[in-house]
Structures are given as structure tokens and as C-alpha cells.
Amino acid sequence: MTVTTADCPQLTPPGGHYSHVAVHHGVAYLSGQLPLTPEGTPLAGEPFEVQVRQVLDNLDACLATAGSSREQLLSVAVYVTDIGDWPSFDRLYGAWLGTARPARVVAGVQELHYGSAVEVQAIAAVG
């Protein structure tokens, strides 16, 4: 079966050698989403909650491009540069996700691209 890749038309094109989404056997793999506006402006200087909301908006766009949705998320990986921001992330994430409860991992990391405070990668079912 073929791997299908796509870039989300609502987001700025990837700045490196990757696609926003890769789909294989009914599973969508979403590249890590940083707090970048659709025009590609980094929001690293903005408050943590603003960055999280942008990342979640970017994930929604990627899920739509893949033909999936929040309710079809299987696994989510979250990277934060300050583990003390975890409760704030979890609150925003829970409100965004609603009743869905995909598997999840959180990792505290030293730094992220553009000086961002959060990055989220996801895997979702398609169809």
C-alpha cells in the first residue's frame, strides 16, 4: 500500500524536508506542530497559552488535511521547554479535546525550534 503525503493548505509550507501529514493503511502521522501562524510567523515571544492555542489550531488543520479529526486521535506526543507549564497545557488540551482521550506522552525538553515553548506531534485514524 502506498504512503500518501500532504501539506496543509492553511499552514505555511514546511521549512524542511518533511510533509505536514503522511497517511498509510488508514493511519495519519502528523508532523510536530510548533506555534507558527498560518503565515509562518513564530509566536515564541507570546504567552504560553497563546502558543498552545496556535499549536492546537495547527493540529486541527493537519487533521482536516488528513481526513481525520480530534475524535480519531490515537496518540499525542507533547514537548514543553518548562515542565511547570504542564498544568496549563493539560487544561487547554482537555478543553480542546473534549471527551476523546488518546494515548499521550509529555516530555520536558531543553529547547524547541524558533525558541518555542511547546510542540505537539500526533497519530490519528483516518476515515
Image (spheres, grey):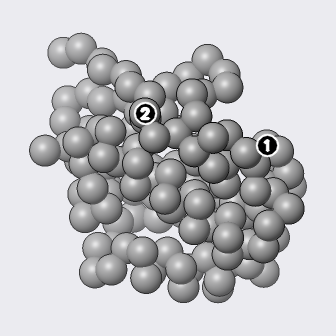
- In what element is the residue under mark 1? helix
**Image quarter (top left, top right, bottom left or bottom right) of the N terminus:** top left
Q: Quadrant of residue 30?
A: top left
Q: Is residue 8 left or right of residue 46?
A: left
Residue type for callout 2: Pro
Classify residue 26 as left or right of residue 63. left
Foreground label between 2 and 1 = 2
**Earlier sequence position, callout 2 versus callout 1:** 2
Q: Residue at x 74, y 72 (%)?
A: 48
Q: Which residue is pictured at 81% across the width and 57% down the height?
A: 44
User: Which residue is identified by label 1?
Assistant: 113
Circle 2 packing at 10 Å, graded few (<14), some (14-19), many (20+), is few
Residue 28 in view, yes or no: no
Find the distance from the CA under tag 2 to the CA under tag 1. 22 Å
| Rendered image: mark on residue 9 | 2
Q: Among all residues in the image, which is located at the extreme left?
A: 127
Mark 2 secondary-structure assignment: loop
Tell me where residue 108 sits by quadrant: bottom right
The residue closer to the viewer here, 49 or 121, is: 49
From the top left corner, tell me how far across and down residue 100 is, in percent: 29, 73
The image quarter in which residue 120 lies: bottom right
Looking at the rendered structure, the kind of residue marked 1 is: His
Q: Above or below — where is 4 with respect to 105?
A: above
Which residue is outermost to the top?
Answer: 2
Q: Residues within 10 Å of mark 1 (few under 14, many from 20)?
A: few
